[in-house]
Amino acid sequence: AVNLAIAFAMQGHENKVGLLDADLHGPCVPTMLGMQDQKLKVGPIGAFPALGPLGVKVVSMAFVLAGKEVPVVWRGPLKMRAIEQFLSEIAWGELDFLLIDLPPGTGDEPLSVLKLLPEMDGVIIVTIPSEVSQNVVGKAITFAKQLNVPVIGIVENMSGFVCPDCGKETHIFMKGGGKKIAQEYSVPFLGSIPLDPRVCEASDMGHPFIMEYSDSPASKAFMIIVKKIKAFISERQS
Amino acid sequence: AVNLAIAFAMQGHENKVGLLDADLHGPCVPTMLGMQDQKLKVGPIGAFPALGPLGVKVVSMAFVLAGKEVPVVWRGPLKMRAIEQFLSEIAWGELDFLLIDLPPGTGDEPLSVLKLLPEMDGVIIVTIPSEVSQNVVGKAITFAKQLNVPVIGIVENMSGFVCPDCGKETHIFMKGGGKKIAQEYSVPFLGSIPLDPRVCEASDMGHPFIMEYSDSPASKAFMIIVKKIKAFISERQS
């Protein structure tokens, strides 16, 4: 989600992209953007998002908690209320896109977001190539369909790894599962993002990978995925 | 959790290991053990676990659902009730160890398990090497300590990848984060499991990797981790 948000900003939407980190138990977005010391700034009309690279507006539970080791020990209703506040009481300002990063699965956080925002353009489902994750993806697609939210498409992450020493490609998490499940459920396949050690390295340093290594195959894959998402949305709105 | 359960069975506990797949939204254990077509068998004293390789007794939400694409759209209280039933109304029989596989984070499932089983021997926390996951692990450790459950230790998964073609090792998800966070929070470090494409391949085919490739570095790492867990538990009980 971090790299997608930055890719949107790079494609003509600087200062107009919002990113809500709705992983309440394990918020990682601030670390990946080097924003871990930020707090939400509160003003008379509500709180304001923190500003990340290219003016991406970020809201995360990490900006609210007292310390990085503090766990959020909440059940469903409190989690729904937190997400509701992030959506309604944050002065997001003018946005072209609001991306909401959700934890894996079909738990409280996705349920809350899909119920609170029935008019959203759609969901993007991220999978690894392996068959093992196919059941989880199938459930996510069914879940979105039950709640009448469009599936924009499937992104296959961790797709192949090219050895930096010899150039040989290995499919560490297998191959082709994303495309296969997209066909099986008749939803669009958006693309595959290859494994690149620099993604993790850049995330650890808080620099968006896609800005640092914009010529890498993974960055190019992100850029194509964003174009497809924008096409999906403009087709739907027309 | 699948490979740990099989490793326990291989170390003298055949037919005496239970594995509860408490990932209600994304149950993967049955696929990884080739048991996706099983259902829970119900008898007069409750339901019985399904039997996997080496007599590992498996219970999963996947054995209850009507189809693999059916999502579990439940909030906290229903999830707690399901886990309670899996723990109290399943005739597990004689067990040396019961492993409970939890989804990532500190959500409803871990909260339910830790509250329902305050006497458990402890929790094992799995991380990737990267700094990005360190906050999440810190939260999990704090969570266990708040609930007075011992932390048996940290396992670092996806540690390094050795190119099968040239032998060069790449740290795709960075390096050393597991050991570092164990030191920071003064909890034991149990070991690192290297990336091996055959882990995913074996999981997709429903064959436990650790039985198929018992000589691989990843399998040896699992075996050492199980020895350390057993030592932790016997020391605690003495």
Image: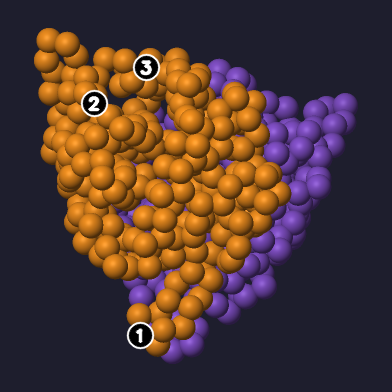
Chain colours: A orange, B purple
Q: Residues within 10 Å of mark 1 (few under 14, many from 20)?
A: few
**As shown in the figure, which amino acid type bears the numbered disc 2?**
Glu
Q: Is residue A210 above or below residue B170?
A: above
Picture coordinates of residue B49, whole percent (x, y): 76, 41
Taking the spot 68% from the left edge, 44% from the top edge, the residue there is A185
x, y (%) of residue B104? 45, 42
Residue hosting label 1: A165
**Which residue lies at the image location 39% right of the left edge and 71% below the top edge?**
B160
Q: Picture quarter containing residue B39?
A: top right
Q: Amino acid at mark 3?
A: Glu
- The residue lying toward the viewer, choosing from A40 and A187, is A187
Label 3 lies in what chain? A
Q: Is residue A196 above or below residue A80?
A: below
Q: Pointer 2: residues within 10 angstroms few (<14), some, or many (20+)? A: few
B89 in relation to B141, above or below: above
Q: Position of residue A231 (x, y in %)?
A: 46, 43
Q: Pick the residue in front: B184 or B66.
A: B66
Badges 3 and 2: C-beta atoms under 8 Å apart? no
User: CA gap, disc 3 to disc 2?
Assistant: 19 Å
Alpha carbon separation for disc pair 3 and 1: 48 Å
The earlier-in-sequence mark between 1 and 2 is 2
Q: Which residue is mark 3?
A: A84
Tell me the chain of label 1: A
Cα separation between marks 1 and 2: 46 Å
Give the mark, 3 or 2, whose residue is nearer the N terminus: 3
Respond whether the residues carrying marks 1 and 2 are from the same subunit.
yes
Per the rendering, the mark at residue A94 is 2
